[in-house]
Amino acid sequence: MIKIGIAGAGAIAGVHIDSYKCFPQLCQVVAVCDSFKDKAEAVAVGKGLKARVYGDLGELMADPNVDAVSICLPPNAHCSAAEAGLRAGKHVLVEKPMAGSLEECDRMILAAETSGTILGIVSQNRYKTPVAKLKRMLDKGLLGSVSYANFDSLWWRSPVYYDLWWRGTWAQESGGCFMSHAVHYLDLMHYLFGMPSRVRASIHNVGHDNSECEDLGFAVFDYKDKIVHFTCSLVSHGERQSITVEGDRGSVGVPWTVSANKSLPNGFPEDDGAGRKVLEDAYLALPDLELEGHDAQLGNFLRAIRGEEPIALDGRTGRKTIELIMGIYKSSVSGAPVTFPLGTEDSFYRKESMVRLMPKFHEKKKSVDNFSASKITLGRDLGR
């Protein structure tokens, strides 16, 4: 039985606890920690846990009865908490974003490799049936040559969202909508297509006057053989999140859409029903995932600890997403394309030098320690 500790008692902690409860034969949540100890106690009671409650992270990491820790803390604490857990011999699963800089990512990776323990990074949208089927179809080459893809990471948050003390600052949150929201879709982009050769990007703040960071941004990724256009927003009512991939045999998208054209003699399109049916049949023939989202990813984490399968998203995989975000921020500041990979000498490798270069769209003037309600929503969540 794997004994789990939860670091952080915010809303996402409840998501992790519920997912761990899906595997009673594999694990048990035995500890919850938060600097606001009453929050940790409330989570433990509310989730019906027989768990020890800590107000100090060091106490949790020193607990010999804890085998693995879910890091559900604000982004600025991810690196230090993960390092502490890994060095204490715990397996560690870190919520998004992995860290606030590439340098922090590398420290976490080194700690895992040195300790011989597992470092996993949460990106639960890989574990969605439409995404898994799209990945299989691309791997099989069913779309033919892909020339273009479009990612819309569209969310809506009111200005009050940024009243929480750590949100909306480059130092604490390490970014705006690209870092905290589009992180999911940037992971899916390199999951589907690999890493691009360069990016050109721009960021803006159009609706959140208590945030230093961006709430709207655009990026164009150059893959040499294809272009990917990316939109990230916190001002989009309806939160219509989607992926569209255009190949020479047709177009497919998530949520699932499919279309195919063939040419009229003058070059204009007409519907290619046969081509569309090939893609539709291929999609329907692929099996649905038995588990999705956090449930599926935390199941992988547990089985990796038991040595039954490899960890699906390790530190090196998670680092790629942070590199994409740093490239976006660098391009938005310089006004020029940025080439990957970013080196250790780059100003956007370390958080301190990145923060100095980033624009402060607004001064953060309001700050609260906690919201009275901790409910969160996960957007449209790449549904079918």
Image (tube, grey):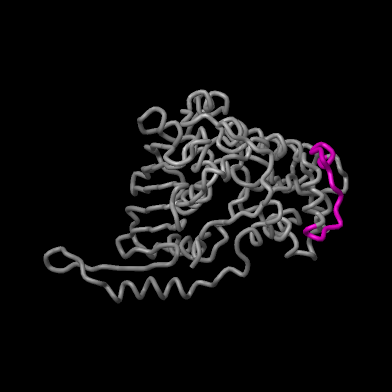
* Quarter where residue 63 is shown: top right
> Would residue 321 appear left or right of 252 to someone viewing this image?
right
> Would residue 297 appear left or right of 336 to someone viewing this image?
right
Closest to the observer: 384 or 278? 384
Residue at point 59% right, 30% down? 171
The vertical placement of 310 against 322, above or below, is: below
Q: Where does the magenta region start and end?
A: 46-61
The vertical placement of 374 against 206, above or below, is: below
Q: Is residue 319 magenta?
A: no
The count of marks equals 0
The quadrant of the rendering that contains the N terminus is bottom right
| Residue 239, x across and y down, in percent | 47, 56
The vertical placement of 220 against 237, above or below, is: above
Closest to the observer: 341 or 228? 228
Residue at point 79% right, 49% down? 5
Q: Is residue 51 magenta?
A: yes
| Residue 205, x across and y down, in percent | 44, 37
Residue at point 85% right, 39% down? 59
| Residue 258, x across and y down, in percent | 37, 68
Residue at point 75% right, 45% down? 7
